Amino acid sequence: MTHAPGKYADFEGLREKAVTLRRAGLSRRQIRDRLHVDNNDMLEGESPPAWTKRPNAKDDLREKARELRLQGWTYDRIQMELGCSKSSISLWVRDLPKPERKRTPEEASAIARRGWEATLLLRDEERQRTKEAARQAVGTLSPRELFLLGVGLYWAEGSKDKPYDRRENVCFVNSDPGMIEVFLTWLDLIGVERERLRFTVMIHESADVAGAERYWADLVGAERSAFNKTTLKRHNPKTVRKNIGGAYRGCLVIKVLRGADLYRRIEGSWYGIVESALRPIT
């Protein structure tokens, strides 16, 4: 490269001195201060000394990853140990031989399955702890709380009067034993005699009908005379039933005889709950 005469007229001489200093380990700044020049062309083709290179923050991780890979560690284990991405690990160790497989596919599958089962067990234990804590937090219901609960329960699961289909009767249907027991307790609270109740079991015809009838009769503590004829749901061969097994007992229908007045009270109470819920909380 040709340079204009003047400050750098002796360019080649200055370059020779600059290169000598560079090879002696000086930085560009040190050379500039020593020779009083700021022309970078003087060091063209000369590599900087190692001490001037900025260290890579991942150099230590890279070396550790290579060390672990040589010990036979998998990408997953290295990632968990070092906290870096698999893509980085793959780049760092791609020239190293793959570790020999120490387990058969069946053994690896069994280990993974046991790990998953342990995870599911921990999750189930956490679910049970949450449910138990919530159960204990309820405490004892006051009569008013039980009354309001029963009204909401009926309005969610009971039959309702329609302008086009007048049905002012109390009829509650559910398959959950707990729901049935709470509803019966609510009827006791508001003074409905058990003699006014009639029960009907509704169940699939292919289920254990007799067993379901015994189960519901024992649950509600009623004589067989209080039960109407069981309603059977016909089997459709094109459908695959999921409500099967010993835990399937169909639904129980509870009807209150002479219940028109009670129905009106339930409906009015429900509207009162809605109105109260919509008021600003003070």
Image: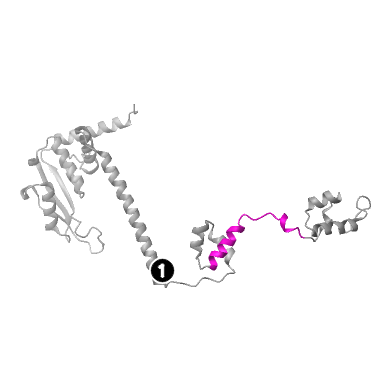
Q: Name the residue at 84% across, 52% down.
A: 39
47 to 225, vertically: above or below: below
Q: Position of residue 244 (x, y in %)?
A: 22, 60
- 196 to the left or right of 265: left
Question: Which of 150/55 is in front?
Answer: 55
Question: Which of 237/20 is in front?
Answer: 20
- 172 to the left or right of 107: left
Does residue 270 show up magenta in the picture?
Answer: no
The amino acid type found where label 1 is placed reads Ala
Is residue 169 shown to the viewer in this render?
no
Residue found at the very far top of the displayed protein: 282
216 to 108, vertically: above or below: above
Q: Name which quarter of the figure residue 249 lies in.
A: bottom left
Label 1 Cα neighbours within 10 Å, binned few <14 / some 14-19 / many ≥20: few
Determine which residue is flagged by label 1. Answer: 108
Q: How is the image coloured?
A: one colour
Magenta span: chief secondary structure? helix
* Callout 1: SS: helix
- Magenta range is 47-70
Question: Which of 204/54 is in front?
Answer: 54
Q: Position of residue 253 (x, y in %)?
A: 16, 47
Q: Quadrant of the C terminus?
A: top left
- 31 to the left or right of 54: right
